[in-house]
Image: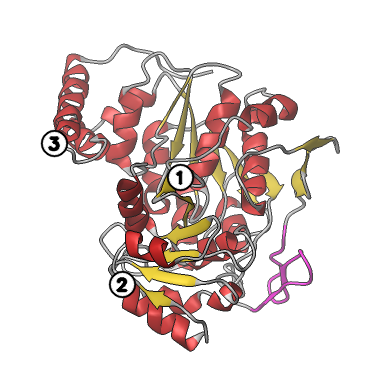
Amino acid sequence: MAGNTEPLSPRAKLAVTAGKAAAAVSRAAGRGSGSVIGGRVALKLDPDLLGRLAQHLDVILVSATNGKTTTTRLIAEALRAAGPVVSNALGANMPAGITSALAGGSDAKFGVIEVDEKYLAGVARDTTPKAIALLNLSRDQLDRAAETRMMAEQWREGLSGSKAVVIANADDPLVVWAASSSPNVVWVAAGQAWKDDAWSCPSCGGVMQRPGDDWFCGQCGFRRPAPSWALNGDYVLDPHGSAWPIHLQLPGRANKANATSSAAVAAVFGVPPQVALERMYQVQAVAGRYDVVTFQNRELRLLLAKNPAGWLETFSLIDPPPTPVILSVNARGADGTDTSWLWDVDYTQLAGHPIFVLGDRKLDLAVRLEVAGLDFRVCETLDEAVSYAPPGRIEVIANYTAFQDLRRRVGN
């Protein structure tokens, strides 16, 4: 059950009203949804507003380097079977954006909240969540985010003694180490395609042994816990050993893994796997990701990839050669200004695809593709890239602000 349901104080009501007004002004000025500026204004007037807005909700927090926006959406759809949901569905995942989202959920039963990795401990302290889903940790925004082991330590300290049920990926050693400080953990075998951030033991620094899907540290004995939920092909295996088919409109193995973790979260609140997974089928796209749009009389599929792990997953779901691929990379504040991560991506997987390169950092990407031995064409605009692309649907892969630029250009 949700906790304290005292009505909002006059100060909190004023903060909510002012925040909504600021957001409306931002939208009218064409500066986006206004959720961040609205939340900042509200928190300035009432620094404790986030906790006050969460007090009547069963809060679920979702954090990870990759997949948190999609998983948040899948959990929200599943939990709507049990009651109204408020969620930061557009991905504004720092305290200001979260505050704005919760301000619109006075009648909700559940608050399903995506949280930036860096802010997880603080948001958990403010909102007293009933469940926390931890999917993965990998390198991301090297100029802003802490090194992965340091991030795992922040999580571990923040979750220590938490009363929340923690639903954690048993296949990611960093997540397991972070979650192990919590007394109530549900382990999910969701997989880990990107392993380059988990070769040393987060507990002792020793070399991790990774035979098959298992992992363990030969020095201190830290090892993969036995999962109670698992992704097995196109099925979710629940703790009773029952297999439930996954039918998603979202592509790729990564989204099946997201659905598995989401089903485990929904079960904490009494929503059975069959019901949860059926509801997840309704999700066709998430904040523009996976959308297929028509532009210049061509079909474009829009795919977001923000870091090496995300690019690896995205390469696994695009159509095979000779499907044309447009790559766009920026390095603005929301992306992280350090593009050295481009050298961690195995671009040779794009061999055989006609490749077109865009974005503020197109020349950085061009050098990386040149070293990978790939043929490509550098273009100034999306229109130019589409005009040169051979027939067929075009796969468009971009990092965060480049993705938003492309969405605006295609009117999505």
Res. 220 visible in picture: yes
Res. 184 visible in picture: no
- Is 411 or 392 nearer to us in this picture? 392
| Type of amino acid under label 1 | Val
Is residue 223 one of those drawn in magenta?
yes
Residue 323 got which mark? none
Is residue 359 one of those drawn in magenta?
no
Give the spatial CA distance, label 2 vs label 3: 28 Å
| Disc 2 target residue | 361
Q: Quadrant of the N terminus?
A: top right
Residue under the point 26% across and 60% down: 333
- Residue 75: percent from left, percent from top: 56, 33
For mark 1, give the secondary structure: strand
Q: Quadrant of the C terminus?
A: top left
Give the spatial CA distance, label 3 vs label 1: 26 Å
Residue 29 got which mark? 3
Residue under the point 67% across and 46% down: 256
| Disc 1 target residue | 293
Q: Earlier in the sequence, mark 3 or mark 1?
A: 3
- Say which quarter of the image contains residue 97: top left
| Type of amino acid under label 2 | Arg
- Residue 100: percent from left, percent from top: 29, 31
> Is residue 243 found left or right of 129 in the rendered image?
right
Mark 2 vs mark 1, foreground winner is: 1
Give the spatial CA distance, label 2 vs label 1: 24 Å
Residue under the point 52% across and 72% down: 354
- Residue 223: percent from left, percent from top: 71, 63
Q: Earlier in the sequence, mark 2 or mark 3?
A: 3
- Is 86 or 119 nearer to us in this picture? 86
